[in-house]
Image: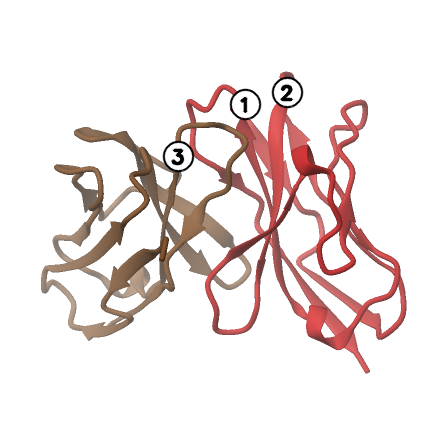
Chain colours: A red, B brown
Amino acid sequence: AQRVTQPEKLLSVFKGAPVELKCNYSYSGSPELFWYVQYSRQRLQLLLRHISRESIKGFTADLNKGETSFHLKKPFAQEEDSAMYYCALRLNSGNTPLVFGKGTRLSVIA
Amino acid sequence: EAQVTQNPRYLITVTGKKLTVTCSQNMNHEYMSWYRQDPGLGLRQIYYSMNVEVTDKGDVPEGYKVSRKEKRNFPLILESPSPNQTSLYFCASSPRKGDTEAFFGQGTRLTVV
């Protein structure tokens, strides 16, 4: 079965410092990968997906099939980036729902 | 407006008293799922449904039931709630196509005393 691993439960960085939230997956095929964000007391919402290769709120994520990783990066963290971040995977065949990692809580310190 | 709606938002109940949390989506999505979110454990899938009358167990189905009699609704049923089911519950829906996002409800915070 496919699996998503986020090795860090909590990541604290200073404002203006670079951020990297790690995500590794185990699946031999070609999955679709997503990052979801949950701000305090709000519902989960999509941050970005690998297929669109876009930058949202300064965040980017590149799919590395060789390392089976989809790390989320931002060059300069802002206080409003503090949130819970979930990496998620879905088979591109569309026959299964999303599989989530356990999440990483990002705390940006002023 | 495209949305996933859960009710109630907050619920406090006693052990053993059956309850239902409703979930409705207006996007004609095939897939719907229920998750529970607990500190340190992240999101864990309870049940999912790939279409009407098609449901399957997720990672933590014990103590829960679901039904999918119509496409828009996917209620979560706790026949005999216990304190270890105290959690924050999220419903999500998505279309069949693999590269499209899932839409989440606003969450239901359940406390079982």
Q: Depth check: give the residue in front, B108 or B58.
A: B108
Establish if B26 lies above or below A108: above
Dot 3: what SS?
Answer: loop
What residue is disc 2 on?
A30
Residue A75, horizontal then vertical, whole percent: 88, 59
What residue is disc 1 on?
A92
What residue is disc 3 on?
B95
Residue A86, horizontal then vertical, whole percent: 60, 51
Residue A104, horizontal then vertical, whole percent: 65, 57
Establish if A29 lies above or below B28: above
Residue beneath the point at 27% across and 44% down: B62
Compare marks 2 and 1 and give the one earlier in the sequence.
2
Q: Report the disc number at residue B22.
A: none
Residue B81 located left or right of residue A52: left
* Chain of the residue under the numbered disc 2 shown in the image: A
Which amino acid is tagged 3? Pro
